[in-house]
Image (tube, coloured by chain):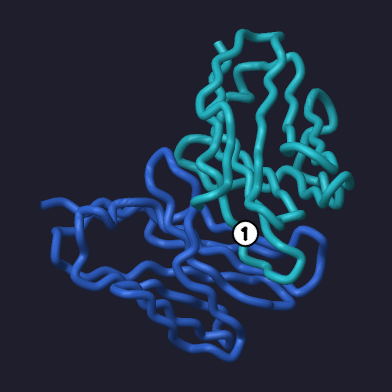
Amino acid sequence: KNQVEQSPQSLIILEGKNCTLQCNYTVSPFSNLRWYKQDTGRGPVSLTIMTFSENTKSNGRYTATLDADTKQSSLHITASQLSDSASYICVVSAKTGANNLFFGTGTRLTVIP
Amino acid sequence: NAGVMQNPRHLVRRRGQEARLRCSPMKGHSHVYWYRQLPEEGLKFMVYLQKENIIDESGMPKERFSAEFPKEGPSILRIQQVVRGDSAAYFCAGRTNAAETQYFGPGTRLLVL
């Protein structure tokens, strides 16, 4: 069964600190993996997209990693800011199927001053 | 998610009424997806449409729910005879033929009294 699991479910960190969010998936055949940021009351916005051959991809203070062998991904946020408070959603795409996106339930990050 | 428009942003209905949610994807995006998000939960796929055609409606309840994406005009998600359990945020996302990345709208928050 194609599934995407994220941990932790929620996280509270101090402003300026780093954090890492985890994503494990069982989606097959794998096409790509995306991390989205969803601010409260808004739609998700894409942060990074990684294909099978990519191990690391950065977008500013966000760095995503992918281990296709263990089917794990992480999103590392450095020097967190208050504006990083949001839900971070891991989305895995399969190569087959008309609707081939599988969503994690997200990690709710709160950055406090 | 700039460019994807959804309206209304908030909709209040009484049980038994009809709810019509509209989504205008970005120009050139002929593929539209609808998702439902309950509080504290992840996005759940409902239906995938490509201009005038329903490609996959496996996530949409068979009764009371319908969706369309006409040749001209926005995509419409229609919920007839709403019940309290329909209260949720409904997001649409669009993409082009060539790319997989979906661009999300800001969502419509439906509250059924």
When the figure is inspected, residue A97 is found, relative to residue A87, above or below; the finding is below
**Quadrant that contains the C terminus of chain B:** top right
* Image coords of residue B32 (percent x, y): 72, 49
Residue located at (83% from left, 49% from top): B51
The crowding category of the residue bearing disc 1, from other C-alpha atoms within 10 Å (few below 14, some 14 to 19, many at least 20), is many
Q: Quadrant of residue A74?
A: bottom left
Residue at mark 1: B102
Tell me the residue at 64%/60% (across/down): A102
Counting the numbered discs, the total is 1
- Callout 1, which amino acid? Gln
Q: SS of the residue at dot 1?
A: loop
Q: Residue at x 10, y 52 (%)?
A: A113
Which chain is the one coloured cyan?
Answer: B
Residue at horizontal 54%, vertical 20%? B111
Residue B9 at what x, y percent from top left? 51, 29
Instruction: In this rendered view, identify the residue nearer to me: A82 or A10.
Output: A82
Q: Position of residue B10 (x, y in %)?
A: 51, 24
User: Can you name the residue that lies furthest to the left here?
Assistant: A113
In which chain is the residue bearing label 1?
B
A1 or B111: which is nearer to us? B111
Q: Which chain is blue?
A: A
The x and y percentages for residue A49 are 53, 74
Q: Please indicate whether residue A49 sits to the left or right of residue B70 in the image.
A: left
Q: Nearer the viewer, residue A104 or B79?
A: B79
Q: Is residue B92 above or below residue A31?
A: above
